[in-house]
Amino acid sequence: MIQQEMVTKADGRKANILALGKAFPHQLVMQDLLVDGYFRDTNCDDPELRRKLTRLCKTTTVRTRYVVMSQEILEKYPELALEGLPTVKQRLDICNKAVTQMAIEASQACIKKWGRPVSDITHLVYVSSSEARLPGGDLYLAKGIGLSPDTNRVMLYFAGCSGGVAGLRVAKDIAENNPGSRVLLATSETTIIGYKPPSVNRPYDLVGVALFGDGAGAMIIGSGPVSGLESPLFELHTAIQNFLPDTEKVIDGRLTEEGISFILARELPEIIEDNVKGFCDKLLGHLGCDDMGYNDFFWAVHPGGPAILNKLEKKLDLWPEKLSASRRALADYGNASSNTIVYVLEYLIEESLKKKKEGKKGGPDLGLILAFGPGVTFEGILTRNLTV
């Protein structure tokens, strides 16, 4: 009971998410138009591949996505739409610039909502699986938004879909161990690093074409919110990580001369289904309370795809509305890798405020933030929604 009271009451020592921000490239792709555009841009006329992608575009439940790829880029780099050419240099030239710009815009939007000057940021955690350079994107972002040279930086590369929650875990630890600190967490991703023409030898590539999107996200994290200056959104409690031995090939990504090649094994949703209950029970065990069921919490789950959400919902016997924020983010932005958890959290807040405006309770205040990535790695944070 002591542990439960500690969680349900505000704790000035715990890290808080103080603001959220997002940014996107200018190209908005309607899912209904994606197949025709993709096959036109890659000069492919294989009818079976077209039928397969058409089916996938419907099953992913994605409606719209933002992408960096454009006609201008394809005109300048036509080799990106050809098979077997060494294009990693061209891809990185595009990606490095694009992710920096999106990270700057997302961070600026987040800082504006936070309401304090950029000079008050003491730490930066930067996450991306879409670039490769030295110095890294953290330095270019710091320069782009005018961070102090005294800012302490941490960079997480190639953590995939779990990167956003992994970055939040790191930012939480920094904030709680450095009193008065304010951590900017920025994530930025683009699919150009892995853009390829369709191929009968790589049918799994079409899953990515139908599912993934581009964008950036940002959060400000700090403990001891300043009254009158800061409005905390989520209070962060226990954060844990778990990797599953011998699952390294289930999510397999490699940087090649043709960019990044990804293979997502068919059994990934089942692997998550088989292990998610034990992981969530371990996380919820830190509450010290056994009389609460899964539907007594809110769920901020990275939407890796509809199959993963469906398996999780079935395994935990969740009410359909419990994953509504995740499904909305997937429909509106696709799986934008590490960024997507920011969009899910924004939708959770929106849903809570809408309920309160209607005179209803904003929903459960306690919940879980979850993501799954290469490893197979589970990331989870026990959190409290301060907007309900």
Image (cartoon, rainbow, N blue to C red):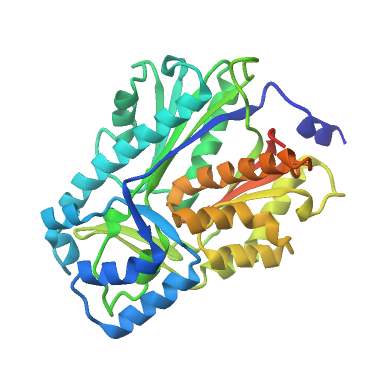
Percent position (x, y) of residue 121?
A: 46, 20
Give the left or right position of residue 167, taking residue 318 as reference. Answer: left
Percent position (x, y) of residue 136?
A: 29, 35
**Splitting the image into 4 quarters, where does residue 277 fall?**
bottom right
- Residue in front for this viewpoint, 33 or 73: 33
Q: In which quarter of the image is the N terminus?
A: top right
Residue 375 visible in the current orientation: no
Residue 330 visible in the current orientation: yes
Residue at (43%, 52%) from the top-left corner?
336
Q: Quadrant of the C terminus?
A: top right
Give the left or right position of residue 156, taking residue 132 as reference. Answer: right
Is residue 243 shown above or below 116?
below
**Splitting the image into 4 quarters, where does residue 361 fall?**
top right
Give the left or right position of residue 36, taking residue 31 as reference. Answer: left
Return the residue found at the far front. 358
Return the residue found at the far bottom. 48
Residue at (35%, 67%) from the top-left corner?
33
Percent position (x, y) of residue 177?
A: 58, 22
Percent position (x, y) of residue 353?
A: 67, 39
- Residue in front for this viewpoint, 334 or 276: 334
- Residue in front for this viewpoint, 257 or 356: 356
Is residue 48 shown above or below 113?
below
Residue at (38%, 64%) from the top-left corner?
208
Give the left or right position of residue 100, taking residue 372 as reference. Answer: left
Residue at (74%, 42%) from the top-left corner?
358
